[in-house]
Amino acid sequence: MAWRFLLATVLGGMCYLDRTAACQLMLHRPLVVATLMGAIFGNLFAGAQVGVVLELIYLARLPVGASIPPDDTGAAVFGGSAAAVASSSVGLDAASFTGLLLLSVFVAETGKLADRFVRKINVRIARLTAESVDRGDARAVEHGLLAGLTLFAVMGAVLALVFSGAGVAVSKGLLPMFGPASRGNFASLLPALPLLGAASVYSCSRTERTAAVFFLTMAAVFGATVIFRWTG
Amino acid sequence: MPPLTTRARRAVWLRQFLLQGCWNYEGMQNVGFAYAILPALREFYSNRPEEGLKAVKRHLEFFNTQPAMGAVILGAAVRLEERVASEEADPRAIGTFKVGLMGSLGAIGDSFFWGALRPMASVAGVLLAMLHPLLGIGALLLLYNGAHLAIRWRGFTAGMEGPEGAVGWLKGAALNVRTDDRKLLSAILGGAYAGVFAGRFAVQGGGAFHALAWFLFSAAAVHLFSVLLRKAVSPSEILSFLLFVGVLILWR
């Protein structure tokens, strides 16, 4: 298990770097991260299931200006690792799946706080950089950037380790505490989660024609899915 | 003044990917911008270290824009610095140019990248991930980065032709039209995603009436959630509420 956590820390840290500090190539998106964590903890497909739902839920919160959206990368680290471990222990039934997705909200908010903390420390780094440049050291810019980047990377690696650990702990410790009957009731909340994701996309893509296009497509695909299920 | 060497130009291009490397609440992307333009400044002021230092200080002023759109401003700032170094332009023009462009480019970039391209790539990736996760991830990364890297590259190249080139490119790129197109595509794909999941949860064998009722309920739920999201209710708050309901269910 130790090598899995090591891998989760390194790869999770790299995904976190992509989130703010470097590149923004979307390697930090929940679909990518949850699938990756699923693969690391033994079940790629279970991780991907979490990623499919989490990917869209937080889309409506944009990283604009100084606003920091909830940490959906962290939620994916937690959810992906938890789902993979649960699938090989208590089983990833609808109720466990719903529970993991809902619990990921704490992770998303904790990650947001950590991000804010790093950005506050970076204020100090930026000031020191400016002071060094005032004293005639232009290389301080490179050192300052490296310090900021290192801070983001360390934060990402620590969060990836803590959140994957929390995911494994929840799957091994918390989920088995609830019997199948009580868990079954919990599953009734599951349909709300993908619909929240769809609402997130809908509210992002506001144009004059959005409402008509969105709901007509929804109706057509819903009809096709229901007919396919009935006949298939 | 000899033109910027290919090596320095490549270094500036690569360093722009770290524009947010030291993002902070005071100067925001200031350290990242100064870091990115440093290789060019070293060449322009190689024989005048005092002026080079002043140039570095100029770029440690507050700066914040959408990171991918920063490439246009960076390219144009390099060209302006070249003109300043050869005494063809006033150094104050650089600050004015950056401040003038970062707000509007930030707004255009936020709307295009975060409001249109990312949702479109995400929902396309998610739909394909239902067939196979790797297919979905591939689609997400290709759809997003195809446009993202092309805009970074074209923006930087246009910026290197000077502020006039940057403005000309921005007009030609018609990002507002592209934003609307991608938003519409996102709405179509988002509708398909909602339809697939609502269909999956429809009661099997429940009859047409049940299916219609479930569809109307799902559509109403999407509408309600979107109203809440537009009223700045965080998805975390909605999920916390659902978790609270879930705990009540377990307690009973």
Image (cartoon, grey):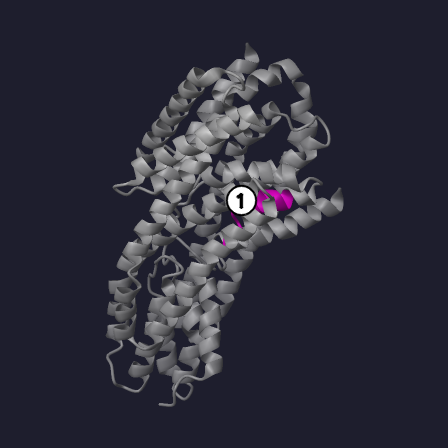
What number of labels is visible?
1
What is the span of residues highlighted in magenta in the rendered image? A25-37
Q: Chain of mark 1?
A: B
Magenta stretch contains residue A212? no
Judge by depth and name the residue closer to the eye, B219 or B61.
B219
Instruction: Say above or below: B98 vs A86.
Output: below
Q: Main secondary structure of the magenta part?
A: helix
Residue A84 image offset from top left, x and y in percent: 67, 36
Task: Pick out the residue farthest to the front.
Answer: A231
- Read off the residue under disc 1: B128
Q: Residue at x 54, y 20 (%)?
A: B204
Q: Quadrant of the C terminus of chain A?
A: top right
Judge by depth and name the residue closer to the eye, B172 or A117.
B172
For label 1, count other residues whose C-alpha is less than 10 Å away and answer few (under 14), some (14-19) or many (20+): some
Q: Residue at x 44, y 39 (%)?
A: A58
Say if residue A184 shows up in the picture: yes
Q: Quadrant of the N terminus of chain A?
A: top right
Q: Residue at x 55, y 58 (%)?
A: A150
Residue A122 image offset from top left, x and y in percent: 46, 55
Amino acid type, residue under disc 1 in the picture? Leu
Task: Pick out the residue farthest to the top.
Answer: B252
Magenta stretch contains residue A34? yes
Residue A52 image offset from top left, x and y in percent: 53, 39
Judge by depth and name the residue closer to the eye, A89 or B131.
B131
Instruction: Say above or below: A128 vs B221.
Output: below
Say if residue A193 shows up in the picture: no
Where disc 1 sits, the SS reads helix
Q: Residue at x 46, y 36 (%)?
A: B193
Residue A185 image offset from top left, x and y in percent: 56, 16
